[in-house]
Image (tube, rainbow, N blue to C red):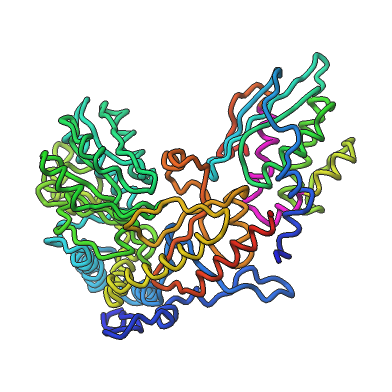
Amino acid sequence: MSDTATLSPTSLGNAPYDVERVRQDFPILTRLVHKRKGRPGKPLVYLDNGASAQKPRQVIDAMSHLLENDYANVHRGVHFLSQRSTDLYEGTRDKVAAFLNAPSRENIVFTRNATEAFNLLAQSWGRRFLKAGDAVLISWMEHHANIVPWQLLRDQIGIEIKVVPVLDDGSLDMSAYAQLLTDNVKLVSITHASNVLGTVNPAKRIAQLAHAKGIPVAFDGSQAAVHQPVDVQAIDADFYVFTGHKLYGPTGIGVMYGKMEHLNAMPPWQGGGDMISTVSFAHTTYREAPYRFEAGTPAIVEGIGLGAAIDYVTALGMDAIHAHEQRLLAYATGRLSEIDGVRIIGTAPDKAAIISFTMDGIHPHDIGTLLDSRGVAVRVGRHCAEPLMDRFGVGATARASFAAYNTEAEVDALVDAVLATKSFFG
Amino acid sequence: MFDDLRDLYQEVILDHGKNPRNFGKPESYNRTARGDNPMCGDKINVYLTVDGNGIIQDLRFDGRGCAISQASASLMTEILRGKPAAEAEALFEYFHDVCTKDDDEQGVHENLDEDATDKLAVLSGVREFPMRVKCATLAWHTMKAALHGDPVTSTENSAF
């Protein structure tokens, strides 16, 4: 898509949020599911956005337009298309920087996803700056992506992992957090918003308390960055991670923001092409950050798709998306709470539009199958957060997570399906 | 209300799911194993008493799971009691086919107790729900692991 104006969503300007116009941008939302012989199928009610969001036509078109018109490898060719692809791909770095309000484009490291970003953080920053006996402070509500990379590092160099507990309503225990910031803690790595509870953690306060002790802070923004505006400078994050596919972009592209003082001090973690300045068999020198962290041909098409996704949400306005989703969250919370036997896990005051719930006597897997038969797609299971499930004494939950294109009518469809499920097993 | 799901959630399954038979850890047993389904967090324990002639004299289970996995475990305990361990494994092979293959694609399963195969057929509905096959087979994998002396099995094992 050579003209960025054509990437804009159909709903623009200062008009009230028009969710029906937003929906028109997402081709998949018109499809019917479970269409079989003699059966008309059911309209899709997609409430599994926390796992992955659907893609607007603007993203799909940007990627296919690239492949049909502008595609070549990046960073190395002198020919026309290589330059064209490089400009588009590197353009996404500018867009991400603006999206997070990063000071510069050099703060933005591309990764495969959020998981890879945490592995990069652990293997590059962690191995350079941590030693046996040092601790990384995470929280009880972390996704496995922000647990397991630190465990791998623990097994490699003997660090300690400390865990901030979660209160019964799903809030982070901030007084415990303050107490856990002991002398051996050298990094705080905490989610900005929980993928299970929806809790939005007080990122700025978390960073303030850590910085008062000279401890840098990394945030997992995989859920937060898709639901609300994020300003890494206002938060004063040292690192901030998110993934493209939950932000209406393609899979295979993620982001790690880092302050330059950190990125410049961090060694490469994967070696290969594109991340080097000079190579000889005796000695190789590496490029500056962020490029030294991006070995090999990157996810060019996906990176450009992410740029289109950021254009899209920026044009809608992250504030407007947030306000819309908060209305849905309040409505859905109210309606589900009225159902006897439904328990919502996570009732913190500040929540992203994510509702995990259980139903008395009905296993989440059965809930998921029954809802699905009515076209309602939710996630069931442990949501890659097994310690948190144990914390709340549940083996699994069902989770409805909302996006810019969801409607109150879809909340009603969810509630109707939950009621029907209850009577089916009743 | 859920017409599409009647094949999956037959009355027998709902009944066994709600009121599982032979549920709870017995006081004595001589074979046991735990089965994990990491996808949903379900865990199940199977306890067997196998006598000197290789006959399953008793089997019970506990643990948590969805209606499908609880019903499957419950049915399994009813079906396998009094059967030789070798027949239990043969029935599992049959059951695995029932859960994963259309009738005309299933292997040859001879000399099986017809009462048992008829009972197991109620779970054939999972065929249409590939994501739920592991729910149905978890108890059987766990039973087999117990017979083979493996303390733990998981749906994420490649053999599943």
Q: Is residue A121 magenta?
A: no
Q: In the image shown, does B158 or A392 lie closer to the viewer? A: A392
Residue B122 position in % (x across, y down): 79, 49
Q: In the image shown, does A327 or B57 lie closer to the viewer? A: A327
Residue A266 position in % (x across, y down): 15, 43
Q: Where, by quadrant of the figure, is residue A387 drawn?
A: top left
Q: Is residue B109 depicted above or below A322 in this figure?
A: above
| Observer able to see residue B109 | yes
| Observer able to see residue A113 | no
Residue A399 position in % (x across, y down): 48, 56
Magenta stretch: dominant SS?
helix
Does A398 sit left or right of B124 as displayed? left
Q: Residue furthest top?
A: B52
Does A185 sit left or right of A168 as displayed? left
Residue drawn at x 37%, y 48% as measured from the top left: A170
Q: Is residue A85 depicted above or below A193 in this figure?
A: below
Q: Report the quarter where the C terminus of chain A lies.
A: bottom right
Q: Report the quarter where the N terminus of chain A lies.
A: bottom left
Residue drawn at x 71%, y 60% as measured from the top left: B5
Does A151 sit left or right of A87 as displayed? right
Q: In the image shown, does A26 or A359 lie closer to the viewer? A: A359
Q: Is residue B143 magenta?
A: yes
- Report the number of numbered marks: 0
Does A250 sit left or right of A160 as displayed? right
Q: Is residue A135 depicted above or below A267 in this figure?
A: above
Q: Where, by quadrant of the figure, is residue A284 drawn?
A: top left
Residue A228 position in % (x across, y down): 29, 65
Where does the magenta region start and end?
Answer: B123-145
Q: Is residue A29 depicted above or below B102 in this figure?
A: below
